[in-house]
Image (cartoon, rainbow, N blue to C red):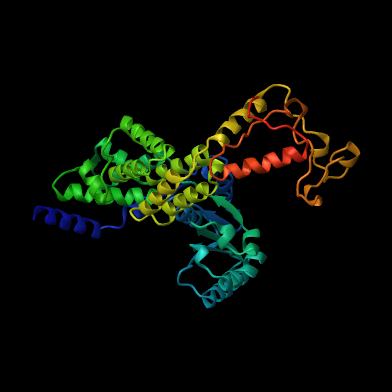
Amino acid sequence: MSGDLFASAAQERLARRAPLADRLRPTRLDDVVGQEHLLGPDRPLRRLIEGDRLSSVILWGPPGTGKTTVARLIARVTAAEFTELSAVSASVKDVRELVARAQTRLGESDVGTILFLDEVHRFNKAQQDALLPSVESGLLVLIGATTENPFFEVNAPLMSRSTLFRLEPLGSEAVRSLLERGLVAEEVAADDDALDLLVDRSAGDGRHALTSLEVAAALAVGRGGDRVLMVDAEAALGTKALRYGRDEHFDVISAFIKSIRGSDVDAGLYWLARMLDAGEDARFIARRLVILASEDVGMADPTSLVVADAAARAVEFVGLPEAGLNLAQAVVHLATAPKSNRVTMALDRAGVDARASGVGKVPMHLRDAHYRGAAQLGHGDGYRYPHDDPAGWVDQRYRPDEVEGNVYYDPSPHGAESEVAERMADRRRADGGVEHDGSR
Protein backbone atom coordinates (compact mmCIF):
# COMPACT_ATOMS: atom_id res chain seq x y z
CA MET A 1 0.00 0.00 0.00
CA SER A 2 2.85 2.39 0.86
CA GLY A 3 4.32 1.81 -2.60
CA ASP A 4 1.05 3.00 -4.13
CA LEU A 5 1.08 6.12 -1.95
CA PHE A 6 4.63 6.94 -2.99
CA ALA A 7 3.75 6.44 -6.66
CA SER A 8 0.69 8.65 -6.26
CA ALA A 9 2.73 11.38 -4.56
CA ALA A 10 5.29 11.20 -7.37
CA GLN A 11 2.56 11.60 -9.99
CA GLU A 12 1.12 14.63 -8.21
CA ARG A 13 4.56 16.22 -7.93
CA LEU A 14 5.21 15.76 -11.65
CA ALA A 15 1.77 17.07 -12.63
CA ARG A 16 2.23 20.36 -10.74
CA ARG A 17 5.18 21.58 -12.75
CA ALA A 18 6.49 21.87 -16.32
CA PRO A 19 8.80 19.07 -17.47
CA LEU A 20 12.33 19.42 -16.12
CA ALA A 21 13.84 19.39 -19.61
CA ASP A 22 11.74 22.45 -20.52
CA ARG A 23 12.57 24.27 -17.29
CA LEU A 24 16.27 23.77 -17.89
CA ARG A 25 16.26 24.68 -21.58
CA PRO A 26 19.22 27.04 -22.08
CA THR A 27 18.59 30.74 -22.72
CA ARG A 28 22.20 31.47 -23.72
CA LEU A 29 24.59 29.70 -26.05
CA ASP A 30 27.09 29.41 -23.20
CA ASP A 31 24.57 27.30 -21.27
CA VAL A 32 24.34 24.63 -23.96
CA VAL A 33 26.15 21.40 -23.07
CA GLY A 34 27.74 19.35 -25.80
CA GLN A 35 27.94 20.22 -29.54
CA GLU A 36 31.17 22.16 -29.03
CA HIS A 37 32.04 21.47 -32.67
CA LEU A 38 29.09 23.68 -33.66
CA LEU A 39 28.50 26.01 -30.71
CA GLY A 40 31.93 26.38 -29.12
CA PRO A 41 33.80 29.71 -29.30
CA ASP A 42 34.24 30.84 -32.90
CA ARG A 43 32.57 27.73 -34.29
CA PRO A 44 30.47 28.10 -37.47
CA LEU A 45 26.91 27.77 -36.18
CA ARG A 46 27.63 29.97 -33.17
CA ARG A 47 29.02 32.74 -35.39
CA LEU A 48 25.92 32.62 -37.61
CA ILE A 49 23.54 32.74 -34.64
CA GLU A 50 25.35 35.53 -32.80
CA GLY A 51 25.66 37.58 -35.97
CA ASP A 52 21.98 36.99 -36.90
CA ARG A 53 23.20 35.98 -40.34
CA LEU A 54 21.62 32.56 -40.51
CA SER A 55 20.60 31.12 -43.85
CA SER A 56 18.49 27.99 -44.18
CA VAL A 57 19.87 25.07 -42.17
CA ILE A 58 19.05 21.44 -41.44
CA LEU A 59 19.86 20.28 -37.90
CA TRP A 60 20.36 16.52 -37.97
CA GLY A 61 20.92 14.46 -34.85
CA PRO A 62 19.54 11.86 -32.46
CA PRO A 63 16.78 12.78 -29.99
CA GLY A 64 17.76 14.92 -27.04
CA THR A 65 20.90 16.44 -28.56
CA GLY A 66 19.71 20.05 -28.67
CA LYS A 67 18.05 20.64 -32.04
CA THR A 68 14.99 22.39 -30.58
CA THR A 69 17.21 24.21 -28.06
CA VAL A 70 19.27 25.69 -30.87
CA ALA A 71 16.11 26.82 -32.65
CA ARG A 72 14.80 28.46 -29.45
CA LEU A 73 18.10 30.29 -28.99
CA ILE A 74 17.89 31.59 -32.55
CA ALA A 75 14.39 32.87 -31.76
CA ARG A 76 15.79 34.88 -28.83
CA VAL A 77 18.52 36.68 -30.80
CA THR A 78 17.12 37.15 -34.30
CA ALA A 79 15.55 40.36 -35.55
CA ALA A 80 13.42 38.32 -37.95
CA GLU A 81 9.97 36.98 -37.14
CA PHE A 82 10.36 33.46 -35.74
CA THR A 83 7.53 31.07 -36.54
CA GLU A 84 6.96 27.36 -36.14
CA LEU A 85 5.05 24.68 -38.00
CA SER A 86 4.41 21.12 -36.95
CA ALA A 87 5.58 18.73 -39.63
CA VAL A 88 3.12 16.19 -38.23
CA SER A 89 -0.03 18.29 -38.61
CA ALA A 90 0.75 21.10 -41.07
CA SER A 91 -0.73 20.94 -44.58
CA VAL A 92 0.24 22.49 -47.91
CA LYS A 93 -2.44 25.11 -47.21
CA ASP A 94 -0.67 26.02 -43.93
CA VAL A 95 2.59 26.45 -45.80
CA ARG A 96 1.00 28.73 -48.39
CA GLU A 97 -0.66 30.86 -45.69
CA LEU A 98 2.70 31.17 -43.92
CA VAL A 99 4.37 32.27 -47.15
CA ALA A 100 1.65 34.87 -47.73
CA ARG A 101 2.16 36.30 -44.23
CA ALA A 102 5.91 36.38 -44.75
CA GLN A 103 5.48 38.34 -48.00
CA THR A 104 3.20 40.84 -46.28
CA ARG A 105 5.56 41.22 -43.33
CA LEU A 106 8.54 41.81 -45.60
CA GLY A 107 6.66 44.30 -47.77
CA GLU A 108 5.10 46.30 -44.94
CA SER A 109 7.81 46.13 -42.24
CA ASP A 110 10.95 44.95 -44.04
CA VAL A 111 11.15 42.07 -41.54
CA GLY A 112 12.20 38.62 -42.65
CA THR A 113 10.74 35.32 -41.47
CA ILE A 114 12.47 32.32 -39.94
CA LEU A 115 10.49 29.07 -40.01
CA PHE A 116 11.34 26.35 -37.53
CA LEU A 117 10.08 23.01 -38.79
CA ASP A 118 10.63 20.22 -36.29
CA GLU A 119 10.72 16.67 -37.66
CA VAL A 120 11.08 18.02 -41.18
CA HIS A 121 11.41 14.44 -42.45
CA ARG A 122 7.67 14.04 -41.80
CA PHE A 123 6.88 16.62 -44.49
CA ASN A 124 5.91 14.83 -47.68
CA LYS A 125 7.22 15.80 -51.11
CA ALA A 126 4.28 18.11 -51.89
CA GLN A 127 4.73 19.99 -48.62
CA GLN A 128 8.47 20.34 -49.13
CA ASP A 129 7.94 21.48 -52.72
CA ALA A 130 5.56 24.18 -51.46
CA LEU A 131 8.35 25.54 -49.25
CA LEU A 132 11.07 25.42 -51.90
CA PRO A 133 10.40 28.64 -53.86
CA SER A 134 10.28 30.75 -50.68
CA VAL A 135 13.46 29.18 -49.32
CA GLU A 136 15.14 29.61 -52.69
CA SER A 137 14.21 33.30 -52.90
CA GLY A 138 15.19 33.96 -49.28
CA LEU A 139 11.69 34.95 -48.27
CA LEU A 140 11.82 32.16 -45.67
CA VAL A 141 14.86 31.06 -43.72
CA LEU A 142 14.22 27.42 -42.89
CA ILE A 143 15.46 25.71 -39.75
CA GLY A 144 14.61 22.06 -40.21
CA ALA A 145 15.23 19.57 -37.42
CA THR A 146 15.32 15.84 -38.04
CA THR A 147 16.43 12.61 -36.44
CA GLU A 148 16.49 10.88 -39.84
CA ASN A 149 19.18 11.04 -42.50
CA PRO A 150 18.15 14.16 -44.44
CA PHE A 151 19.79 12.91 -47.62
CA PHE A 152 17.08 10.25 -47.70
CA GLU A 153 14.17 12.18 -46.20
CA VAL A 154 14.55 15.77 -47.44
CA ASN A 155 14.08 16.68 -51.10
CA ALA A 156 17.38 17.23 -52.87
CA PRO A 157 16.53 20.80 -54.03
CA LEU A 158 15.70 21.79 -50.46
CA MET A 159 18.87 20.14 -49.16
CA SER A 160 21.00 21.94 -51.74
CA ARG A 161 19.71 25.29 -50.49
CA SER A 162 20.36 24.50 -46.83
CA THR A 163 23.48 24.08 -44.74
CA LEU A 164 23.60 20.77 -42.90
CA PHE A 165 24.75 20.77 -39.27
CA ARG A 166 25.06 17.39 -37.58
CA LEU A 167 24.53 17.18 -33.82
CA GLU A 168 26.20 14.31 -31.99
CA PRO A 169 24.93 12.32 -28.97
CA LEU A 170 25.92 14.02 -25.74
CA GLY A 171 29.02 12.69 -24.04
CA SER A 172 28.97 11.37 -20.48
CA GLU A 173 30.39 14.59 -19.03
CA ALA A 174 27.75 16.69 -20.80
CA VAL A 175 24.92 14.44 -19.56
CA ARG A 176 26.29 14.53 -16.01
CA SER A 177 26.46 18.33 -16.19
CA LEU A 178 22.78 18.39 -17.21
CA LEU A 179 21.83 16.07 -14.37
CA GLU A 180 23.67 18.20 -11.83
CA ARG A 181 21.65 21.21 -12.99
CA GLY A 182 18.54 19.09 -12.71
CA LEU A 183 19.36 18.17 -9.10
CA VAL A 184 19.58 21.86 -8.23
CA ALA A 185 16.25 22.56 -9.93
CA GLU A 186 14.59 19.63 -8.18
CA GLU A 187 16.18 20.59 -4.83
CA VAL A 188 17.47 17.09 -4.19
CA ALA A 189 20.84 15.36 -4.01
CA ALA A 190 21.81 12.02 -5.54
CA ASP A 191 24.12 9.13 -4.83
CA ASP A 192 26.99 8.76 -7.28
CA ASP A 193 25.92 5.27 -8.37
CA ALA A 194 22.41 6.55 -9.12
CA LEU A 195 23.81 9.36 -11.26
CA ASP A 196 26.16 6.92 -12.99
CA LEU A 197 23.20 4.74 -13.93
CA LEU A 198 21.21 7.70 -15.29
CA VAL A 199 24.21 8.84 -17.35
CA ASP A 200 24.87 5.33 -18.65
CA ARG A 201 21.27 4.73 -19.68
CA SER A 202 20.79 8.12 -21.34
CA ALA A 203 22.52 6.95 -24.54
CA GLY A 204 23.57 10.55 -25.17
CA ASP A 205 19.97 11.82 -24.99
CA GLY A 206 19.86 14.83 -22.66
CA ARG A 207 16.07 15.03 -22.59
CA HIS A 208 15.77 11.37 -21.65
CA ALA A 209 18.34 11.82 -18.88
CA LEU A 210 16.48 14.80 -17.39
CA THR A 211 13.09 13.10 -17.65
CA SER A 212 14.47 10.03 -15.86
CA LEU A 213 16.00 12.23 -13.17
CA GLU A 214 12.69 14.06 -12.71
CA VAL A 215 10.86 10.80 -12.12
CA ALA A 216 13.61 9.52 -9.82
CA ALA A 217 13.51 12.76 -7.79
CA ALA A 218 9.72 12.54 -7.51
CA LEU A 219 10.02 8.97 -6.23
CA ALA A 220 12.66 10.01 -3.71
CA VAL A 221 10.51 12.87 -2.38
CA GLY A 222 7.44 10.65 -2.42
CA ARG A 223 9.06 8.28 0.08
CA GLY A 224 10.00 11.23 2.29
CA GLY A 225 13.61 11.58 1.18
CA ASP A 226 15.64 14.34 -0.40
CA ARG A 227 18.25 12.15 -2.07
CA VAL A 228 17.96 10.08 -5.23
CA LEU A 229 19.12 6.54 -4.48
CA MET A 230 19.97 3.71 -6.84
CA VAL A 231 16.53 2.19 -6.25
CA ASP A 232 14.91 5.46 -7.42
CA ALA A 233 17.04 5.61 -10.56
CA GLU A 234 16.28 1.97 -11.35
CA ALA A 235 12.57 2.51 -10.89
CA ALA A 236 12.60 5.65 -13.05
CA LEU A 237 14.39 3.82 -15.85
CA GLY A 238 12.40 0.62 -15.55
CA THR A 239 15.64 -1.35 -15.49
CA LYS A 240 18.13 -2.77 -13.07
CA ALA A 241 21.73 -1.63 -12.81
CA LEU A 242 24.36 -4.05 -14.06
CA ARG A 243 24.43 -7.00 -11.72
CA TYR A 244 28.16 -7.47 -12.16
CA GLY A 245 31.09 -5.16 -11.66
CA ARG A 246 33.41 -3.53 -14.19
CA ASP A 247 35.94 -6.37 -14.12
CA GLU A 248 33.28 -9.01 -14.65
CA HIS A 249 31.77 -6.88 -17.41
CA PHE A 250 34.91 -7.51 -19.47
CA ASP A 251 35.01 -11.17 -18.45
CA VAL A 252 31.43 -11.73 -19.58
CA ILE A 253 31.88 -10.05 -22.96
CA SER A 254 35.11 -12.03 -23.43
CA ALA A 255 33.26 -15.28 -22.72
CA PHE A 256 30.52 -14.19 -25.13
CA ILE A 257 32.92 -13.53 -28.01
CA LYS A 258 34.99 -16.66 -27.41
CA SER A 259 31.85 -18.83 -27.29
CA ILE A 260 30.70 -17.59 -30.69
CA ARG A 261 34.23 -17.88 -32.11
CA GLY A 262 34.24 -21.44 -30.83
CA SER A 263 30.93 -22.16 -32.61
CA ASP A 264 29.09 -22.96 -29.36
CA VAL A 265 25.71 -21.45 -30.15
CA ASP A 266 24.13 -22.31 -26.79
CA ALA A 267 26.98 -20.72 -24.85
CA GLY A 268 26.70 -17.62 -27.02
CA LEU A 269 22.98 -17.38 -26.27
CA TYR A 270 23.59 -17.92 -22.54
CA TRP A 271 26.08 -15.05 -22.30
CA LEU A 272 23.79 -12.84 -24.41
CA ALA A 273 20.88 -13.52 -22.05
CA ARG A 274 23.14 -12.90 -19.07
CA MET A 275 24.17 -9.49 -20.41
CA LEU A 276 20.66 -8.43 -21.38
CA ASP A 277 19.29 -9.49 -18.00
CA ALA A 278 22.02 -7.50 -16.26
CA GLY A 279 21.12 -4.37 -18.19
CA GLU A 280 24.16 -4.29 -20.49
CA ASP A 281 24.02 -1.67 -23.25
CA ALA A 282 22.53 -3.46 -26.27
CA ARG A 283 24.47 -1.20 -28.63
CA PHE A 284 27.73 -2.35 -27.02
CA ILE A 285 26.75 -5.97 -27.64
CA ALA A 286 25.80 -5.16 -31.24
CA ARG A 287 29.11 -3.42 -31.90
CA ARG A 288 31.03 -6.45 -30.71
CA LEU A 289 29.01 -8.73 -33.00
CA VAL A 290 29.74 -6.51 -36.01
CA ILE A 291 33.46 -6.67 -35.22
CA LEU A 292 33.34 -10.45 -34.72
CA ALA A 293 31.60 -10.92 -38.07
CA SER A 294 34.72 -9.73 -39.89
CA GLU A 295 37.36 -10.76 -37.37
CA ASP A 296 36.34 -14.39 -36.81
CA VAL A 297 33.98 -15.31 -39.69
CA GLY A 298 35.11 -13.07 -42.52
CA MET A 299 34.89 -14.43 -46.03
CA ALA A 300 34.00 -17.91 -44.84
CA ASP A 301 30.45 -16.52 -44.67
CA PRO A 302 30.31 -12.98 -46.11
CA THR A 303 26.64 -12.65 -45.12
CA SER A 304 27.61 -12.67 -41.44
CA LEU A 305 28.62 -9.01 -41.56
CA VAL A 306 25.26 -8.17 -43.14
CA VAL A 307 23.41 -10.07 -40.40
CA ALA A 308 25.42 -8.45 -37.60
CA ASP A 309 24.95 -4.98 -39.08
CA ALA A 310 21.21 -5.60 -39.45
CA ALA A 311 21.02 -6.59 -35.78
CA ALA A 312 22.86 -3.41 -34.79
CA ARG A 313 20.43 -1.32 -36.81
CA ALA A 314 17.49 -3.17 -35.25
CA VAL A 315 18.76 -2.22 -31.79
CA GLU A 316 18.51 1.46 -32.79
CA PHE A 317 15.22 1.09 -34.66
CA VAL A 318 13.31 -1.34 -32.43
CA GLY A 319 14.98 -1.02 -29.04
CA LEU A 320 14.86 -3.42 -26.13
CA PRO A 321 13.39 -5.75 -25.15
CA GLU A 322 12.28 -6.76 -28.66
CA ALA A 323 15.71 -6.14 -30.22
CA GLY A 324 17.01 -8.97 -28.03
CA LEU A 325 15.48 -11.28 -30.63
CA ASN A 326 17.52 -9.64 -33.38
CA LEU A 327 20.70 -9.97 -31.34
CA ALA A 328 19.88 -13.62 -30.65
CA GLN A 329 19.42 -14.30 -34.37
CA ALA A 330 22.80 -12.71 -35.07
CA VAL A 331 24.41 -14.84 -32.34
CA VAL A 332 22.95 -18.03 -33.80
CA HIS A 333 24.07 -17.10 -37.32
CA LEU A 334 27.60 -16.15 -36.28
CA ALA A 335 28.10 -19.12 -33.97
CA THR A 336 26.96 -21.64 -36.58
CA ALA A 337 28.81 -20.00 -39.49
CA PRO A 338 32.12 -21.42 -40.75
CA LYS A 339 35.03 -19.51 -39.25
CA SER A 340 38.03 -17.76 -40.77
CA ASN A 341 40.39 -15.14 -39.41
CA ARG A 342 42.19 -14.65 -42.72
CA VAL A 343 40.78 -11.13 -43.24
CA THR A 344 42.28 -10.11 -39.89
CA MET A 345 45.61 -11.71 -40.75
CA ALA A 346 45.63 -10.10 -44.20
CA LEU A 347 45.12 -6.61 -42.78
CA ASP A 348 47.88 -7.17 -40.23
CA ARG A 349 50.31 -8.30 -42.94
CA ALA A 350 49.42 -5.42 -45.23
CA GLY A 351 49.82 -3.01 -42.33
CA VAL A 352 53.42 -4.11 -41.82
CA ASP A 353 54.27 -3.17 -45.41
CA ALA A 354 52.18 0.01 -45.34
CA ARG A 355 54.16 1.27 -42.33
CA ALA A 356 57.55 0.28 -43.72
CA SER A 357 59.82 3.08 -44.87
CA GLY A 358 60.29 3.61 -48.59
CA VAL A 359 56.94 2.01 -49.54
CA GLY A 360 54.03 3.74 -51.19
CA LYS A 361 54.94 5.24 -54.55
CA VAL A 362 51.90 4.81 -56.79
CA PRO A 363 52.75 3.16 -60.12
CA MET A 364 52.45 5.58 -63.03
CA HIS A 365 49.68 3.67 -64.81
CA LEU A 366 47.50 3.80 -61.65
CA ARG A 367 47.77 7.53 -61.06
CA ASP A 368 44.85 9.90 -61.55
CA ALA A 369 44.59 10.84 -65.21
CA HIS A 370 41.37 12.86 -65.15
CA TYR A 371 42.70 16.37 -64.71
CA ARG A 372 44.19 18.63 -67.35
CA GLY A 373 47.89 18.01 -67.84
CA ALA A 374 47.88 14.57 -66.23
CA ALA A 375 48.57 12.86 -69.54
CA GLN A 376 51.67 15.02 -70.06
CA LEU A 377 52.97 13.69 -66.76
CA GLY A 378 52.40 10.12 -67.90
CA HIS A 379 49.57 9.48 -65.46
CA GLY A 380 47.43 6.53 -66.50
CA ASP A 381 49.81 5.56 -69.31
CA GLY A 382 49.55 1.81 -69.86
CA TYR A 383 46.52 1.26 -67.63
CA ARG A 384 44.34 -1.63 -68.83
CA TYR A 385 40.61 -1.40 -68.08
CA PRO A 386 39.49 -4.81 -66.70
CA HIS A 387 35.95 -4.52 -68.08
CA ASP A 388 37.33 -4.43 -71.61
CA ASP A 389 38.58 -8.01 -71.19
CA PRO A 390 36.03 -10.83 -71.69
CA ALA A 391 37.16 -12.36 -68.40
CA GLY A 392 36.56 -9.10 -66.52
CA TRP A 393 40.12 -9.32 -65.20
CA VAL A 394 43.55 -8.47 -66.56
CA ASP A 395 47.03 -9.13 -65.28
CA GLN A 396 48.70 -5.86 -64.35
CA ARG A 397 50.68 -4.45 -61.46
CA TYR A 398 48.65 -2.72 -58.72
CA ARG A 399 51.25 -2.12 -56.00
CA PRO A 400 54.56 -0.33 -55.50
CA ASP A 401 57.64 -2.28 -56.59
CA GLU A 402 58.82 -2.90 -53.01
CA VAL A 403 55.77 -4.97 -52.07
CA GLU A 404 54.62 -6.35 -55.41
CA GLY A 405 55.32 -10.00 -54.59
CA ASN A 406 54.04 -10.06 -51.01
CA VAL A 407 50.96 -12.12 -50.21
CA TYR A 408 48.63 -10.80 -47.50
CA TYR A 409 45.34 -12.60 -48.01
CA ASP A 410 45.50 -16.40 -48.04
CA PRO A 411 41.93 -17.82 -48.12
CA SER A 412 41.07 -20.68 -45.81
CA PRO A 413 39.30 -23.83 -47.04
CA HIS A 414 36.27 -23.07 -44.86
CA GLY A 415 32.81 -22.21 -46.11
CA ALA A 416 32.45 -19.70 -48.94
CA GLU A 417 36.12 -18.77 -48.61
CA SER A 418 37.05 -21.99 -50.40
CA GLU A 419 35.31 -20.58 -53.49
CA VAL A 420 37.31 -17.37 -53.12
CA ALA A 421 40.49 -19.43 -52.93
CA GLU A 422 39.57 -21.23 -56.15
CA ARG A 423 38.90 -17.97 -58.03
CA MET A 424 42.23 -16.58 -56.89
CA ALA A 425 44.00 -19.79 -57.94
CA ASP A 426 42.37 -19.63 -61.39
CA ARG A 427 43.69 -16.12 -61.89
CA ARG A 428 47.19 -17.11 -60.82
CA ARG A 429 47.13 -20.01 -63.26
CA ALA A 430 45.91 -17.71 -66.04
CA ASP A 431 48.77 -15.40 -65.16
CA GLY A 432 51.21 -18.28 -65.36
CA GLY A 433 52.09 -17.59 -61.74
CA VAL A 434 52.71 -19.95 -58.88
CA GLU A 435 50.51 -20.95 -56.02
CA HIS A 436 51.20 -19.17 -52.72
CA ASP A 437 51.02 -20.70 -49.27
CA GLY A 438 50.61 -17.38 -47.50
CA SER A 439 54.21 -17.14 -46.34
CA ARG A 440 55.98 -13.79 -46.60
Relative placement, left or right, of 268 versus 40 is left
Q: Is residue 357 above or below residue 214?
A: above
Q: Nearer the viewer, residue 409 or 373?
A: 409
Q: How many marks?
A: 0
Q: Could you say where residue 300 lies in the image, as x and y percent from the top left?
A: 54, 43
Residue at horizontal 36 percent and vertical 55 percent from the top: 22
Q: Most extreme residue toward the bottom, as rendered?
A: 93
Horizontal side of residue 229 vs 88, given as left or right: left
Residue 185, given in percent of the width and then of the height, sits at 29, 47
The quadrant of the picture occupied by the N terminus is bottom left
Residue 379 x/y as whole percent: 85, 39
Which of the 4 quarters of the picture holds residue 382? top right
| Res. 354 in view | yes
> Quarter holding the C terminus?
top right
Closer to the camera, 400 or 321?
400
Q: Can residue 32 be seen from the camera position used here?
A: no
Q: Is residue 154 left or right of residue 7?
A: right
Identify which residue, 79 or 138, lies in the foreground. Answer: 138
Residue toward you, 114 or 67: 67
Question: Residue 312, percent across and down?
Answer: 45, 49
Going 38% across and 37% down the picture, which residue do you hit?
259
Q: Quadrant of residue 288?
A: top left
From this viewpoint, which residue is outermost toward the left? 1
Spot the residue most to the top.
Answer: 357
